Amino acid sequence: MGVKGFVEGGVASIIAGCSTHPLDLIKVRMQLQGEKPSLPNPALRPALVFSSSSSSAGIHVAPSLPPPPRVGPISVGIRIMQTEGVAALFSGVSATVLRQTLYSTTRMGLYDVLKTKWSDPETGSMPLARKITAGLFAGGIGAAVGNPADVAMVRMQADGRLPAAQRRNYRGRRNYRGVGDAITSMARQEGVGSLWRGSALTVNRAMIVTASQLASYDQFKEMILEKGVMSDGIGTHVAASFTAGFVAAVASNPVDVIKTRVMNMRVEPGVVAPYSGALDCALKTVRAEGPMALYKGFVPTISRQGPFTVVLFVTLEQVRKLLKEF
């Protein structure tokens, strides 16, 4: 029973992740809007940096440019297709497959095991508090296992927004060829530890998402069936899963924004990192862009989280029926 839960959850998660990947990519690009790139300061001319003259007349200060206008998810999607091609909407999909294989298979399987052990043997249900606890535990373990793939996915999705000269892996080629190339490049250029950059954020986000998503789905499904609103079919699965997706999106978006920015930052030897950690990133983001910056990308988040959760649970229910005899 335990192994079957891992297989069912893994298959459903991979299908859901691949089918909603373009929405996830748009969400990542929107979450990075307004973030200042870590480029050398162009304010001083190199010839004058070491000049002994203290006169400000010889210093050429670069004019401050207004921040670029923020655009919505449709505009972001159109811009990606125009500048990078339609195939760019699936940048990092190999990392998505690996991430779902590691992260979602683990969290879905563990949640299923805990649900089986903690459910009332007579009614087959368990209290909401236990569902949330099971989700927190399963999500945290799954995130720790899948963090390298998560970092690689963010890097691959964000790569297209960089100038071409900065999009290079450790072999000197532009862009990443796949998730293996992304992980290898990061490990060689920034150290193996970079593969777990933002892991605390990933774990926190996964605990929130899993607890809100899985517990909400089970809770809403039970409520619909108990009240006799609908029978146990696709209609019930869609209604419960979409509601669960909305709850998960609202709860996780702030952590997701910070996670995306911390994972995407590139740390070069001898250069101060843009952020010293999650809290520093959160403070700098709010100070520079306002509190609502933590909900950047919320429209594509809910646009992705809703369909993802619907596809996930509808597929999961169908896979369970297919594997019922095994």
Image (cartoon, rainbow, N blue to C red):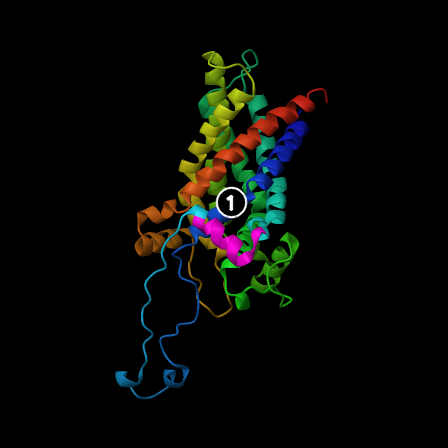
- Pick the quarter of the image with the N terminus: top right
At 62% from the left and 41% from the top, the residue drawn is: 102
- Pick the quarter of the image with the C terminus: top right
Q: Is residue 146 visible?
A: yes
| In the depicted structure, whether residue 71 falls above or below residue 67 | above
Q: Amino acid at mark 1?
A: Asp
Q: Is residue 294 left or right of residue 97?
A: left
At 45% from the left and 28% from the top, the residue drawn is: 243
Decide whether the magenta segment is chiefly helix, strand or loop. helix
Q: Is residue 52 left or right of residue 122?
A: left
| In the depicted structure, whether residue 45 falls above or below residue 260 | below
**From which residue to which does the magenta span run?**
75-86
Residue 325: percent from left, percent from top: 72, 19
Residue 140: percent from left, percent from top: 52, 39
SS of the residue under disc 1 = helix
At 37% from the left and 53% from the top, the residue drawn is: 70
| In the depicted structure, whether residue 168 falls above or below residue 22 | below
Q: Circle 1 is placed at which residue position? A: 24
Q: Is residue 244 left or right of residue 143?
A: left
Residue 307: percent from left, percent from top: 51, 34
**Is residue 116 on the magenta stretch?**
no
Residue 228: percent from left, percent from top: 47, 11
